[in-house]
Image (cartoon, grey):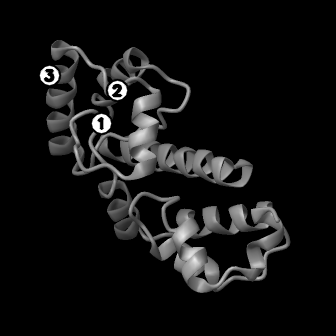
């Protein structure tokens, strides 16, 4: 039985276990989503989940951003983040790249008060590093919006992967 055909039959624990990891360490979105059952199909679920995320308060949004790991240097990664960073070859940085990522992470977090977030799927470490170098020059409001967009992309990638297993 596919996940899509079984969506409305999942109990709260199963549902939260599956969907509570879509937004990094942010289970409350899945908890709110569970209360919106039944879903017509997976697209209905995805749309409702994204709507919950996009309607979050600024403070809740900041907490979601702050739940994300620092690229390359963070050691305590969720299973999803670890897989995503590995696929972008971020686990195989040279010492120079590691040092630059460390410095950029520190500067970025000091300036914006949340970690640099980018949907790494389909990107390599040089592309990510170049993006990091550019985005650190943005203003806080722009970067807040851009980071929210990136979190949404990550969530959509994770949902797509969940439904195509």
Q: Position of residue 109 (x, y in %)?
A: 20, 44
Q: Which numbered disc, 1 or 3, marks the residue that appears first in the sequence?
A: 1
* Disc 2: which residue: 90
Q: Nearer the viewer, residue 165 or 36?
A: 165
Q: Nearer the viewer, residue 57 or 151?
A: 151
Q: Nearer the viewer, mark 2 or mark 3?
A: 2
Quarter of the N terminus within the rendering: bottom right
Q: Residue at horizontal 78%, vertical 82%?
A: 38
Other-residue count near label 2 (Cα within 10 Å), few / some / many at <14 / 14–19 / ≥20: many
Q: Nearer the viewer, residue 95 or 135?
A: 95
Cα gap from disc 1 to disc 3, whole angstroms: 12 Å
Q: Are marks 1 and 3 in contact (CB under 8 Å)?
A: no
Q: Nearer the viewer, mark 1 or mark 2?
A: 2
Instruction: Evaluate whether residue 55 shows in this view.
Output: no
Cα gap from disc 2 to disc 3, whole angstroms: 13 Å
Instruction: Evaluate whether residue 6 shows in this view.
Output: yes
* Disc 1: which residue: 71
Residue that lies at the very extreme toward the front in this rendered image: 1
Q: Are marks 2 and 3 in contact (CB under 8 Å)?
A: no
Q: Is residue 7 left or right of residue 22?
A: right
Q: Position of residue 132 (x, y in %)?
A: 33, 26
Q: Is residue 89 left or right of residue 96?
A: right
Q: Which type of secondary structure does the marked residue at label 2 adopt?
A: loop
* Disc 3: which residue: 99
Residue 71: quarter of image: top left
Q: Which type of secondary structure does the marked residue at label 3 adopt?
A: helix
Q: Which mark is residue 45?
A: none
Q: Which numbered disc, 2 or 3, marks the residue that appears first in the sequence?
A: 2
Cα gap from disc 1 to disc 2, whole angstroms: 8 Å
Q: Are marks 1 and 2 in contact (CB under 8 Å)?
A: yes
Q: Position of residue 83 (x, y in %)?
A: 45, 39
Q: Is residue 87 left or right of residue 135?
A: right
């Amino acid at each position: 039985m596919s996940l899509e055909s079984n969506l409305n039959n999942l109990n709260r624990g199963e549902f939260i276990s599956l969907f509570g990891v879509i937004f990094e360490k942010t289970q409350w979105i899945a908890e709110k989503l569970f209360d919106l059952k039944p879903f017509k199909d997976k697209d209905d679920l995805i749309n409702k989940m994204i709507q919950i995320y996009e309607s979050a308060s600024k403070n809740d949004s900041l907490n979601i951003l702050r739940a994300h790991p620092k690229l390359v240097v963070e050691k305590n990664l969720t299973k999803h983040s670890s897989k995503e960073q590995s696929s972008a070859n971020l686990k195989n940085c040279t010492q120079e790249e590691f040092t630059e990522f460390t410095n950029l992470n520190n500067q970025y977090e000091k300036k914006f008060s949340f970690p640099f977030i980018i949907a790494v799927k389909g990107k390599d470490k040089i592309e990510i590093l170049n993006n990091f170098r550019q985005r650190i020059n943005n203003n806080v409001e722009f970067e807040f919006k851009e980071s929210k967009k990136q979190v949404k992309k990550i969530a959509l990638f994770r949902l797509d992967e969940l439904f195509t297993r």
